[in-house]
Amino acid sequence: MNKLTNIEYWKAITLLGLNVTTYKPALAKNILFFAKMSISNIKWDDFSKEFLNLYIKHLETSDFPQHNTKGKLSKIENIIKKLKLNIIDMDKAIQMVALEGLNDVVPRFHTIGLDNKLAKNYFYDFEFGKNIILKDSIFDIVHDFEDELFKEVDTRWKLVESAFKINHTDYDFQLANDLRDIYIRNGYERRNITKNIDFLSPYQGNVCFYCGELMTSIHVDHVIARQIINHDEIWNLVLAHSSCNMLKTDLMVAPHFIKKLIIRNENIMGSSHPWKYRISKQLGNTPQNRRQTTLKHYENAKVIRGNAYWGGKKDYNPEKDVFYRKLITKINEKKFN
């Protein structure tokens, strides 16, 4: 096996493996903070204080669970809860983090999957309760990839806690440690989706979903990228010009296209076509449930891909798109009944 580079070791450690809590991405962010400050020998109390402050700041903007088990708070959450209730003061909170919050994640941080030897002590050495000593390997990658590393760790944290949220609230999903795992686990191999052209065309009036112009070359497109959602269900498929499809690629789409997709699907639900039962099974039995489920998939996709999106062609105005304002069902009764 060829030796991995410093950045490859870091990505393997931080982006792979199972998570019971969000401690690993939080610890990674803490390490990056001190490396960015060019501090190599970190006192244990200083490291614990910053770890605590990192969680306090994170939980101010996130109400997602930090532990995979429903109804159970992580140790760090319990410490912060006691701090907010004035049961303990800041000094006591830091002491508890030092003893209880870091006792497992610091020794286990370098584990890749189930392998705790491949990258053992690669980025730091430590003496529990005394100090953490960062190595040249972490300073090298922070110097070269600082912005990318912080962004990846933040994304990983969001992915882990988002998966925990779904594990706590959605019994249709089995336990997963990453939001992407849920779609992979519940997905299936790509199917031939061109057969859906004849069915979808009447619901779009033979115009492109994205630009509202008459179609010549027709592509069947996944509104929420298949790379994320991992299936070919009809509720997420639309017809588009090949040019629009190539411009969009697998980017996130602007919110007005999700609104348009929701309306299009309700248009199908108002027909007698049997596909409506499939959509109902996938999204819900009522318009409100279907809308909420679609928006949930969209929000999940944003967690994975970020908020940057493709809004359509430069001169496209959704308010002038007839099928955006009022999608007209053109059902050929002979064909669909």
Image (spheres, rainbow, N blue to C red):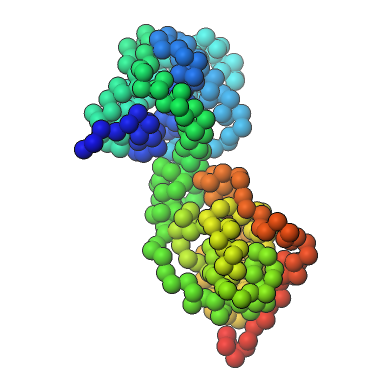
Image spot of residue 174 (x, y percent): 40, 51
- Residue 10, x across and y down, in percent: 37, 31
Of 124 and 140, nearer the camera is 140
Residue 222 higher or lower than 300, as above or below: below
Left or right, 137 with respect to 229, comes to: left
Q: Residue at point 53% right, 23% down?
A: 54
Considering every residue shown, the one lying at the far right of the view is 320
Asked whether the viewer can see residue 144, the reply is yes
Whether 152 is drawn above or below 133: the answer is below
Where does the C terminus fall, quadrant-wise? bottom right
Outermost residue to the bottom:
334
What residue sits 50% from the left and 15% below the top? Answer: 37
The quadrant in which residue 183 appears is bottom left
Number of residue marks = 0
Q: Residue at x 42, y 59 (%)?
A: 187
Of residues 240 and 79, the one nearer the viewer is 240
Look at the image and tell me whether residue 44 can be seen: no
Q: Nearer the viewer, residue 160 or 120?
A: 120
Which quadrant of the figure contains the N terminus?
Answer: top left
Give how far across and how far down residue 162 sits, in percent. Answer: 50, 42
Percent of width and height locating residue 109: 35, 27
Q: Residue at x 55, y 61 (%)?
A: 246
159 to 187, vertically: above or below: above
